Image (cartoon, rainbow, N blue to C red):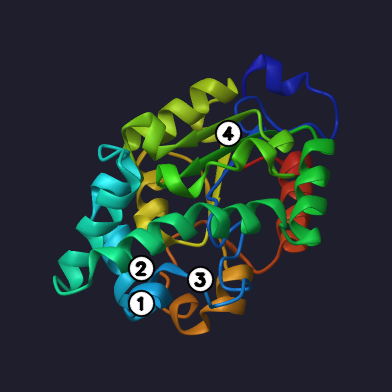
Amino acid sequence: MNLADSQRAPGRPASGTELLGAAFDLFYTLIDMRHLPEAGSTPDLLGIDPKVWSRQVMELSPHHALGTETDPVESIRRIAHAIDPAIPLEKIRDAARARPERFRAALLRPRPEVTAGLARLRAAGLRLGLISNAGLDEIEAWPESPLAPFFDAALFSCYEGVMKPDPEIYRRAATRLGVPLAQCLYVGDGGSQEHEGANAVGMPTVLMLGLLRRSYPEIAATRPRITRWVVESFGDLVTLVERLRRDGLE
């Protein structure tokens, strides 16, 4: 124990162990696309199985999340034709037109427990960040979202030119929040190998499955349990944060 630790006020965490911030994933951690009407979803409009579409977008089409293809129709065409080259261009145009409004609806109507939980985390004194693998067409409405004011820094892969699980995007988030990586939680539903990336840079990690389990229970069941903590809901997360703020991360 160093001198500063021996002289700290009772109930205060040891130097270097205080929880100072939290960085969040966006999709299925803060917002849920599944609760929107199924009609109008991209795979629905294109006649593609939603799970096949999701894998192609998230794992096999980095141009979309990195923003390297700025034409929205061409971006969707590249993804769609990688699955089925016979999909007509007119269907692809319709799907590309529908995407921003669908994502807007999700961003503008977050669940009340999410906004209430974020408010409690801010009240607890945490700096909050967002790290999202997201295409240009998916986050047009972010500035209008009720979620946006809660965050001190929001990093979207399409603007950053780097995506999870690349260590660089986590480092950028911590720098912009002004907190050490080791004193900033990373909270997500486990997609895109996000916790592997956060673990690699020394962030304490939390798997939060509530929204994903509500929408895709079979996917939630297979998420790797490689995080320091697992919580179900924002209420559980707030309870964890309050304990960590009191007792420290060790």
Kind of residue at disc 3:
Gly
- Examine the rendered structure and indicate whether residue 149 appears above or below residue 210: above
Kind of residue at disc 1:
Lys
Between 13 and 167, the one lying in front of the other is 167
Q: Earlier in the sequence, mark 3 or mark 4?
A: 3
Q: Do tag 2 and tag 1 residues touch (Cβ < 8 Å)?
A: yes
Q: Secondary structure at mark 2?
A: helix
Q: Position of residue 76 (x, y in %)?
A: 30, 56
The residue tagged 4 is 183
Q: Earlier in the sequence, mark 4 or mark 2?
A: 2
- Examine the rendered structure and indicate whether residue 133 appears above or below residue 216: above
Kind of residue at disc 2:
Ser
Q: Secondary structure at mark 1?
A: helix
Left or right of 22 on screen, residue 241: right
Q: Residue 54 shows which numbered tag?
A: 2
Answer whether residue 206 is visible to the viewer in this image.
no
Between 85 and 10, the one lying in front of the other is 85
